[in-house]
Image (tube, grey):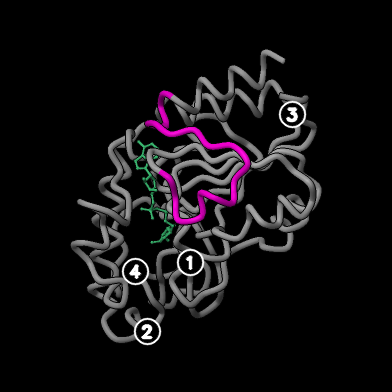
Amino acid sequence: MAAFNNIVILTGAGLSAESGLGTFRGPGGLWENFRIDDVATPEAFARDPVRVHDFYNLRRSWHKAAKPNAAHLALAGLERKHGDVLTVTQNIDALHEAAGTRRLIHMHGELERALCVACGTSAPWNKDLTIETHCASCGKAAMRPDVVWFGEMPREMERIYEALGACDLFISIGTSGAVYPAAGFVLEARAAGAHTVELNLEPSDGADLFLERIEGPATEIVPAYVDRLLRR
Ligand code: APR
């Protein structure tokens, strides 16, 4: 492997699976027990905010018990030792931060933040949210989880595309490649001439787009891959 200067890492639910947080697709995935249209769209929230709050309150309770695993820690170590690394996560958990990653974009928002629909203020939030929760800024009872729902624009896309256009290594970890725009990042990176690697339990929907692929559980293959990168 040649040395790399600018690294972009994309992570998905598979990275946090071994921290006890479920993935979305496949056997036992969250979308087997909940319908996206009932709990993860702006229309669902308009129709039945209590149901949507219940869904995210449940997930918040799971997240509270979760700790970063060896893969999160290895990625934080890569950032610390290598320097020019941008981590873009689709995960709304806070496990990258807990592991020590600093240059991080939560493109699908954060479960531990609440957003006021009335005034647009986003604030840290680690309790249950209800339709009666008041905004600390404007006082209105108009809070929602500060996450990106299906049909909404992911966060910081300009910064992400800029980084993809300048990277020479793109690593995709624990994501099925089923959801855009994240599933298209590999093509952006390849257009920039980057080496592209998929680290996943099984081949993702877009596995053939990657120049290198390693299959296995994230807690095994991510630390091993990071070690290889840092040894050069
Ligand atoms: N190690 C590595 N990969 C794993 C592991 C593991 N221990 N466990 C599961 N995986 C892989 C699965 O094989 C699958 O390819 O992680 C991937 C998880 O895919 P999804 O459940 O589709 O999660 P993700 O790609 O993050 O979903 C994208 O979809 O529902 C929305 O907003 C949600 O951000 C999410 C987006």
Q: Is residue 9 left or right of residue 142?
A: right
Looking at the image, the residue that sits furthest to the top is 231
Residue 37 lies, in percent from the top left, at 31, 77
Disc 1 C-beta below 8 A from ligand 1 = yes
68 drawn magenta = no
Helix, strand or loop at disc 4?
Answer: loop
* Up-down relation of residue 100 to residue 142 (above or below): above
User: Between marks 3 and 1, how big is the CA–CA gap?
Assistant: 29 Å
Q: In the figure, 29 relative to 85: above or below?
A: below
From this view, report whether residue 193 is shown above or below residue 101.
below
Under circle 3, the secondary element is loop
For marks 3 and 2, give the CA distance: 41 Å
Q: Which residue is mark 4?
A: 133
- Amino acid carrying label 4: it is Thr
The disc labelled 2 sits on which kind of residue?
Glu
The stretch of residues the image draws in magenta is 203-220
Task: Determine which of the numbered discs, if any, sits on residue 83 in the image.
Answer: 3
Callout in the foreground (3, 4): 3
Mark 3 nearby-residue class (10 Å; few <14, some 14–19, many ≥20):
few
Number of numbered discs present? Answer: 4
Q: Earlier in the sequence, mark 2 or mark 4?
A: 2
Determine the residue positioned at 25% across, 71% down: 35
- Tell me which label, 4 or 1, sits earlier in the chain: 4
